[in-house]
Image: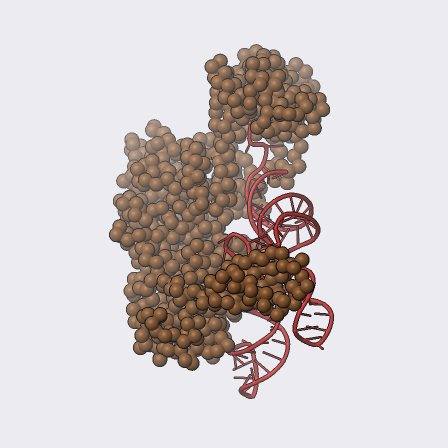
Chain colours: A brown, B red
Amino acid sequence: MAAENIQGGEQRRQDSALQDAARQDSALQDAARQDAERAGRAFQEGSKYDPWAIEAKWQKRWEDAKVFETEADPSRPKYYVLEMLPYPSGTLHMGHMRNYTIGDVVARVKRMHGFNVLHPMGWDAFGLPAENAAIKNNTHPRTWTNNNIGEFQRVLRRFGFSYDWRREISTCEPEYYRWNQWFFLRMFERGLAYRKKSRVNWCPKCCTVLANEQVINGYCWRHEDTLVEVREIEQWFLKTTAYAEQLIDDLKTLEGGWPERVITMQRNWIGKSVGARVKFGVADVAGLEPIEIFTTRIDTIYGASAIILAAGHPLVQELLVGAKDTRLRADVDAKLKKMRAASVKAEDLETAEKIGFFTGAHATNPFNGEKIPIWVGNFVLMEYGTGAIMAVPAHDERDFEFCRKYGLSVRPVVQPDGVAALDGATMKAPFVEHGGAKLVNSGPYNGLGVDDAIVAMAAHATEKGFGQRETTYRLKDWGVSRQRYWGTPIPVVYCEKDGIVAVPDDQLPVVLPKDVALTGEGGSPLAATPSFVNTTCPKCGGPARRETDTMDTFVDSSWYFYRYCDPHNDKAPFDSKKVAYWFQIDQYIGGITHAILHLLYSRFWCKVMRDLGLITHSEPAARLFTQGMVLKGGVAMSKSRGNIVGAIDMAEKYGADTGRLYMLFANQPERDLEWSEDSIEGSWRFLNKVYRLVDRHASELASAKAGVADHEAAGLSAKERKLLRVTHETLRRVTQDFDARWHFNSAIALIMTLYNEVDGAEPLGDGVRPEVRKEVLELLTLMLAPMTPHLAEELWEMLGHSNGLWSVGWPEFNAALAKEDEVEIVVQVNGRVRGKLVVQAGTSEAGVISKALADPAVAAHIANKQVVKQIVVPNKLVNLVVK
RNA sequence: GCGGGCGUGGCGGAACUGGCAGACGCGCCAGCCUUAGGAGCUGGUGACCGCAAGGUCUUGGGGGUUCAAAUCCCUCCGCCCGCACCA
């Protein structure tokens, strides 16, 4: 069933046999599900509220009425709310369900507020698990994936999430991934996609290369127990570094809309530092190029005690050629070997001691002509800057540690104001601050402040030609080649004559072949498929080989949200006009796990698309919400940990609305949530109570007038007045919780409290005219609507409406009605509560105080004492300070 | 080490800009209704003292600011997350 709804096309028809198999599995699962649902009904037997019937009924109505289908409409304000698209693994669990529930509430609230809401869903369908599952079960990745998609879709539909399913996309379909290829070619044309041989991260379990972002403390992001190896491989890169400056700069535009810590994480990841390159000539070995170092503190260059090279620096070997002593030579080779083999494991890094050795050669400080020794040190990274540094121990923690250990001189050149002169021989720690200090021992620069000195000295270096200002980034280009099958083929061929040749646009997509031997052994499966590999050169028509690497699946998810705007376009990735209407994403919702990977790549892609002229904005999402994880046993639910609770189980046992309500009630959405099924009963009971309440009044109220036209003139009884007051006050606060704070848990608590007030100790009914009762019950229903939409529709119908709740807006609260006539004032004596008063709202300070003093309980506490101070917080509190 | 977050009853959690700590729900206790109930309803439920009225204590520990602190400041402890030799 579900697979039918994925966008059609030639490829899918070809795969119909595979999908038939998937469908048969699904049919079996359906039968099992119906059994379970029957069991749920039996379990809840005796309750009048029948969520299974109600939910099926309204889901059908919504579908028939096309309630959630949206089109771009410039005459209406739009709202694009998006939950990160799931990888369709085996089971849709409570973590997913929480994510989509939050998004659905937002979508429904925004619809009620009159926005034209885009709320789509799709599948991140390429990826390694499908391939591994296929190998294990001797099936095809497509079968496995489409099976899971069918299952995911069914569960999402079962929960009544308000998606426009016509816009569903699946990234493993050629209709989608052809545009990955198209974008790749645009980048290739502009030099943003390039091929190079480089040291890469290799996961032996994935049997593929990983991007830097996918290496966590030296381990694979998918395999927490697998150390990443370093291999030298030729592969494709996307030039993310070309956008490093913008990626960091535009973070400013996200402040306020994105969580602070995500912005910080991105900023740190990109790791901009502004500094300078300086060349130090090699003094002892003839004919060598100068050594270039990178520093952010050129102002401290007069304090340089040594040059330190990374173990992998190309000049290390050449410098050692000059070492005369062969014993030194042998010793040094052993040390180098040890340094290069140093483990990348986090725990080793933590305890890593700084080690190094002297090369025997010296370099010349271009500022003062001083000869300083050239060392090799394990703490200098080849991958950052130039792989060489100047060590200024007096003003850098690491240099200080290294130089002290090896007895290198420490010479302060920046002197903090108002302190005794720093002494290199005795100082216990380096002075690393910038402010409030002047240069000393620095020739013509003495007396300058740090920032001024940096400018002046960099200018001097530039002028003399031995240096220049430079900005470096920690961010590296995105390696996108993957030596696996289940991904987007990279649309390039290798021709003996023409070299690397792009596949022309009109030959896209390069379709992933269906029949490929998947063994999990050896190299890329595509490379072992001659019918795929052997092709002709688009340029010369001669024999050529296809590229057999596929793209990192993060490519798929870097731009998918644009495709939702125009999912069936076969001429372009999307129509820019449609995107211009819907974008930016107003609210993106997903896990913090993607704070770097997905979000960084998406931001990069957006800027590239902007420079291609497809869009005009620079950031894809104006607001980002990172919802907390659902934990079981203290760790996030995940298939690999085997601690999954399936969302469907909850729908079967209690119905979707109870499940949704409970997910929202259990905690604030940004906090982590330890899963426990114990208290879901409370949500079930509450919905039952609401149902029974409305049911009891429905027949009488169905034809009643809706609400009181003029509350002032109506002559409301005290009881009616109170009912309306508490209802409207609840509405005011619930509206605030929905719009401003997303505190769905306290919104639900407020609605529960309202129920208790309306129908608690005293049942609703006696002496309350129908129109008042109806107003109360309608508002209660509307407040529940975003969270428990099926039940709300049913109640709305029971209350006599045939129009469907989806056509009803969010109610306005009546401020006059919500206002309290009387307020309770807490009376404190010396900060301790001693009594309570009920007074007319707005009673004067003097009036409140005299009443407070007259209160017998209060009087007892101030007897024989003198009131020295009276504090009055209007409508709230009186504090009498006595001595 | 650096950056960020968190710490409230038996449990999940409320408490908006400092103003009644423990809302709401779970669980538990008692009662009602029932042939029965994992159904429903009513009441109670932070700890301690007290027959009661009432009082004292209480938001990880300690200190401070304030008429008033879960909330602000200092300090210590614990847990979680991110970064981690980035020159």
The residue shown at (43%, 33%) is: A245
Q: Position of residue A278 (x, y in %)?
A: 52, 19
Q: Quadrant of residue A482?
A: top left
Q: Position of residue A45 (x, y in %)?
A: 47, 78
Q: Quadrant of the C terminus of chain A?
A: bottom right
The residue shown at (29%, 62%) is: A66
Q: Is residue A160 visible?
A: no
> Is A479 on the left-hand or right-hand side of A835?
left
> Is A800 on the left-hand or right-hand side of A661?
left
Whether residue A178 is situated above or below residue B19 in the rendered picture = above
The residue shown at (39%, 52%) is: A82
Q: Position of residue A757 (x, y in %)?
A: 48, 72
Whether residue A851 is situated above or below residue A265 in the rendered picture = below
Whether residue A210 is situated above or below residue A32 in the rendered picture = above
Q: Position of residue A477 (x, y in %)?
A: 45, 34
The residue shown at (63%, 18%) is: A373
Q: Is residue A257 visible?
A: yes
Q: Nearer the viewer, residue A433 or A619?
A: A433
> Is A759 on the left-hand or right-hand side of A426?
left
Whether residue A380 is situated above or below residue A441 in the rendered picture = below
